Amino acid sequence: MVRRGVFGFGFGRRSLVFASLRGRAVLAVLVLTLGITFPWADQYQEAARAATTVTTVEDTVRGTGNNQFEYTGTWVRCAGCSPATANSSFYYNYTAGQKATLRFTGTQVKIYGVKETHGGISSFSVDGGSPTAVDTYAASSSAALVYTSPVLPLGSHTLVMTNTSQRNPAADSNTLSIDKAEVIAETGPAATLYGRAGTFGNLGTTLPSGQSLQTAAVSGWGFNAGQSEFFSTLAANGEVVLGTNSQTDNQAYPTADHMSIGVFNPSARTFRNIVVPTSTGATSATNPFYPIGGASVETLLPVTVGGQPRVAFISLVAYHGWNITEKGEYPSLGYLDAVSGSLQYNAGLSRTAGQIHAAGGLGAAACPRRANLFGQQVADCRGLSEMGVLPLSQKFIVTQYFPDTANGEHSGRLVVLGTDGTVAASYTYPNIPDGNGGYIQVSPREVVVDPTSSGSLEYFTVVFDTSTGGAQSSFPLQEFAYNRSTNQIIPVSRPVLSGQTNASGQPYRFETATYDAQGNLWATQAVTNSLAGGPIVVYVKNAGSRKLQNTCAAGANWNGAGWGTTCAPDRTAADTSNYGQTRSFTQDPVSRTMFAATLSGYLLRVKQTGSGSGLTLTTLPTVNLGLDQLIDRNTYPIGIRKGVVDAQNRALYVPVVQVQNPASCPTWPGSTPCAPQPLDQWLYRFDLSALSS
């Protein structure tokens, strides 16, 4: 078995996958044969429209929260004073260095005060930026607009107003007066789809489910030949960084001759590709017999290394048989740096599989060497699939997808990597009997990290891909912990399923998972060997722990017992079962809304309130992403990949990926690849302010 692809069935099953995506005619067949139901957009006409809102914050609204004034120092409220204001009140101060702070969410703010003979020169600074000097002197007194901020990205901002003690020569004092603020939120469209000009099909200005839509052609948009879009992340400079994958949706069957990463700048609306060189500086490397090779880019994450913000990435398959003396090796763990505001590849920090092996210790076993066709010893990290950043140690927890079958292993591994690529801990998953004298092939795929971990233990959860006799079987999830004091990976829970079934009695398996900011573990589900989805469920963190840590605990010296046992979730989100498999699962921490984007082209929204035993879930109406209007899905297979939330700017980005039509290259996967070709890809931006309610 090789890593499950974007369309759900993994390698060797692309004909079935493609057939199952051929529009409603084939979906009708799926309904009959697999029991899948897909509710269509006309059932959901929700009016989450774009709008401009103006919120007035009076001077008397005090505090440290959103849309509140925080006065620091000696401020005086003048009630019923002249000049008259709407609420007959304003605050003033004439002491040097004293401040008023306004925290707000929007795109612009206006401050109204008093212009008068006492008015001084004050400074206004947004988000710690360069201050703007404002002179409030006037020959006669009036309530007036004194400051308007620049137009800002939609999100959370902080305005600081400071009395500088300076004044106009004509003024008789240096007073700073505050009457009110107007917070402006220009939300724009609820959804924006970015891509190459002329590739937006029949999409108009409204999604099928009623939300406002804008299609936006981007300068330079286009992934390199042979590359499809993959996972996404957000860099510290606000750019969206996009990994790349083979157009076969199968990393073992590449379609490019290089390694590259896409970078989208939302502010400038520009796109570029970063070509990652090998260790010898080569910008392409191909199989000795074919014009393809290169390397894939899986998980990307924002990290801080050496005190600098960077983007880390891993590669599942970084080598395809070439002469490494000539062509070198691609990084298995790589980094991008922001240099003069632009992301660039950092070869010095990045590590190839050979470098991880050469570091010795656990690295040699994690990335063993084997001989290639040229008699060279080439290291292989066994498919670095996905990774997370452990919140306390700031190390990477990484899943290794491929078992070491040469040494009798039928399961993959988990490793903890330092930011320098050294292996701090390794865990070989036990061989799991299949009940028929063989073993289940267990491939750790997804890993998600608990941000609320404390003490020595850093918790994380793994979702497994599994197969028995070459056929897909149930995908459990399991919670682990990394003990940062002893450098050990410890099984915390048994590998569990929810025990839930669909109306036909078919059991669900787990698909993807994430922890929210409170430490609740959320998971999406699907039906085995189908495209049908299942309900979103939650294992609640209550009184400091989750059910996985107690009721469903693995126990000491766990060795594989209890595979696939039931651990019933604490919560199940209503009306989340019938929209296909989830490919992106993220949380907006501001509104506490979970967003699940599905392969079928829907965005599910579940809003949470309360915590612990008081956690309540509310499912909001589903958003239809309009993929059927974007392109002819009878001919061009498209789907969804893992998105990323920009909480500050109230945006959710979700990649829309196109992979190769098998008919366009019928011999690959197979005997002969085709020359690399470009395929159109897209990126959705959703306005979280519009879609969180």
Image: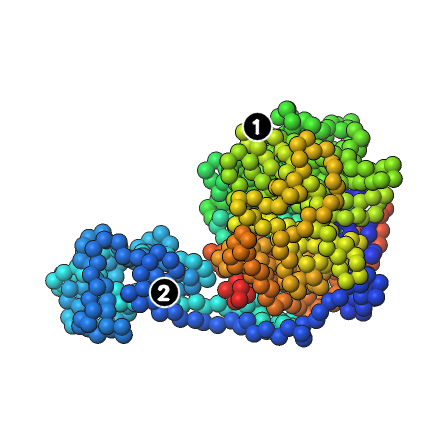
Q: Nearer the viewer, residue 345 or 526?
A: 526
* Quarter residue 615 falls in: bottom right
Q: Residues within 10 Å of mark 1 (few under 14, many from 20)?
A: few
Question: Please, what is the three-letter code of the amino acid marked with disc 1?
Answer: Thr
Question: Which residue occupies 28% across, 65% down?
Answer: 59
Question: Which residue occupies 39% across, 60% down?
Answer: 66
Question: Which residue occupies 66% across, 65% down?
Answer: 575
Viewport quadrant of the N terminus = top right
Point out residue 477 in the picture as x, y percentages from the top left corner: 68, 45
* Quarter residue 301 falls in: top right
Point out residue 693 in the picture as x, y percentages from the top left corner: 53, 66
Task: State the SS at label 2.
Answer: strand
Point out residue 188 in the picture as x, y percentages from the top left corner: 50, 68
Badge nearest the viewer, 1 or 2: 1
Label placed on residue 109: 2
Q: CA distance from mark 1 to mark 2?
A: 51 Å
Point out residue 454 in the picture as x, y percentages from the top left corner: 51, 39
Number of numbered labels in the structure image? 2
* Quarter residue 626 falls in: bottom right
Q: Are marks 1 and 2 in contact (CB under 8 Å)?
A: no
Can you say whether 80 is above or below 397 in the image?
below
Q: Nearer the viewer, residue 566 or 260?
A: 566
Q: Residue furthest top?
A: 361
Residue 33 is left or right of residue 332, and the answer is right
Question: Which residue occupies 70% across, 71% down?
Answer: 40
